Image (cartoon, grey):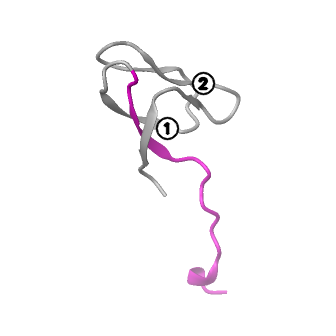
Amino acid sequence: MKRESIMMPKPRSSFLSVQCPKCGEKAIVFSHTTINMSCKSCGELLAERSGSKANIVGKVLEVLDQ
């Protein structure tokens, strides 16, 4: 079997560009983060950890990794 013909599954996780709801600062967050992510300028919560996929509190601008 040729190496090029092997089907590889796509990952279900991705990186997200998220905008802070309080100050508008942009940050990059992993979709399945295991820690709470806060804004670096104002400290507002951007992504809250959960058992699997993170709860994104800020506005998702785009998916960076597909």
**Residue type beneath disc 1:** Phe
- Kindly state the secondary structure of the residue where label 2 is placed: loop
Question: How many numbered markers are drawn?
Answer: 2
Image coords of residue 40 (percent x, y):
32, 19
For mark 1, give the secondary structure. strand
Q: Nearer the viewer, residue 31 or 6?
A: 31
Q: Is residue 63 above or below residue 55?
A: below
List the residue tagged with mark 1. 30
| Quadrant that contains the N terminus | bottom right
Query: Farthest bottom residue?
Result: 1
Residue occupying the point 55% across, 31% down? 33
Q: Residue at x 46, y 28 (%)?
A: 58
**Quarter of the figure with residue 20:** top left
Spot occupied by residue 7 in the image (x, y as percentages of width and height): 65, 74
Q: In the rendered structure, which segment of residues is drawn in magenta?
A: 1-21
Pick the front one: 65 or 63: 63
Whether 43 is drawn above or below 29: the answer is above
Q: Position of residue 4 (x, y in %)?
A: 56, 82
Asked whether 37 or 3 is in front, the reply is 37
Amino acid type, label 2: Arg
Q: Callout 2 environment at 10 Å: few (<14), some (14 to 19), or many (20+)?
A: some
Task: Place residue 49 in its image quadrant.
Answer: top right
Q: Nearer the viewer, residue 66 or 22?
A: 22
The residue at which mark 2 appears reads as: 49
In the drawing, what numbered circle is on residue 22?
none
Q: CA distance from mark 2 to mark 1?
A: 10 Å
Q: Is residue 14 magenta?
A: yes
Is tag 2's residue or tag 1's residue first in the polypeptide sequence?
A: 1
Q: Report the residue at 45% width, 53% height from top.
A: 65
Is residue 7 covered in magenta? yes
In-image side of 32 versus 20 (left or right): right
